Image: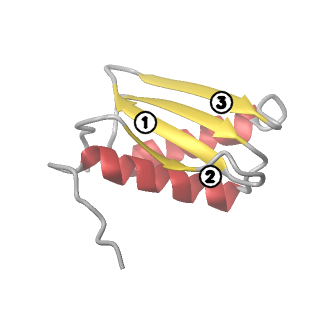
Amino acid sequence: MAMLRRPAQAGTLESSDCLVSVAPSETRELDHRGAGATFFAGRTRGLVNDVLDSLGISGATVTIQDQGALEVTLRARLDTALERASREEDVACPRQ
């Protein structure tokens, strides 16, 4: 996965979660808002860069609305949003 095809998101705005939105871009941009955004700015920027580097993504706009999410939650939401954004087409989830 080295190319984002469309905007996508993952997560919620519930307490202790985060909403991560990603979109294709020529450059890397990060907009981190919410609880602890200033305090955790360095950690979050490093995490986003690590994930994008590991997937070979050179350009993406990443917006994170942080509601006090743990690092593992943030990483999972980012991974999911990036996977959704890289799909050839939208895949509907079956309802049970």
Report the residue at 31% width, 44% height from top.
Answer: 85
Neighbour tally class for label 1: few under 14, some 14-19, many 20 plus, Cα within 10 Å: many
Q: Is residue 28 left or right of residue 58?
A: right
Neighbour tally class for label 3: few under 14, some 14-19, many 20 plus, Cα within 10 Å: some
Neighbour tally class for label 2: few under 14, some 14-19, many 20 plus, Cα within 10 Å: many
Q: How far is disc 2 from disc 3 in space, using C-alphas?
A: 11 Å
Q: Amino acid at mark 1?
A: Val
Q: Picture quarter containing residue 39?
A: top right
The x, y position of residue 47, in whole percent, is 60, 46
Which secondary structure, mark 3? strand
Label annotation for residue 70:
none
Q: Is residue 40 above or below residue 18?
A: above
The x, y position of residue 90, in whole percent, is 22, 51
Report the residue at 81% width, 28% height from top.
Answer: 38
Label tally: 3
Residue at label 3? Answer: 32
Q: Residue furthest left?
A: 88
Q: Is residue 33 left or right of residue 20?
A: right
Q: How far is disc 3 from disc 1 in space, using C-alphas?
A: 12 Å
Which secondary structure, mark 1? strand
Q: Picture quarter containing residue 2?
A: top left
Q: Amino acid at mark 2?
A: Leu
Report the residue at 38% width, 47% height from top.
Answer: 82
Q: How far is disc 1 from disc 2 in space, using C-alphas?
A: 13 Å
- Choose the circle earlier in sequence order: 3 or 1: 1
Residue at label 1? Answer: 22
Q: Amino acid at mark 3?
A: His
Residue at label 2? Answer: 74
Q: Residue furthest bottom?
A: 96
Q: Is residue 44 above or below residue 80?
A: above
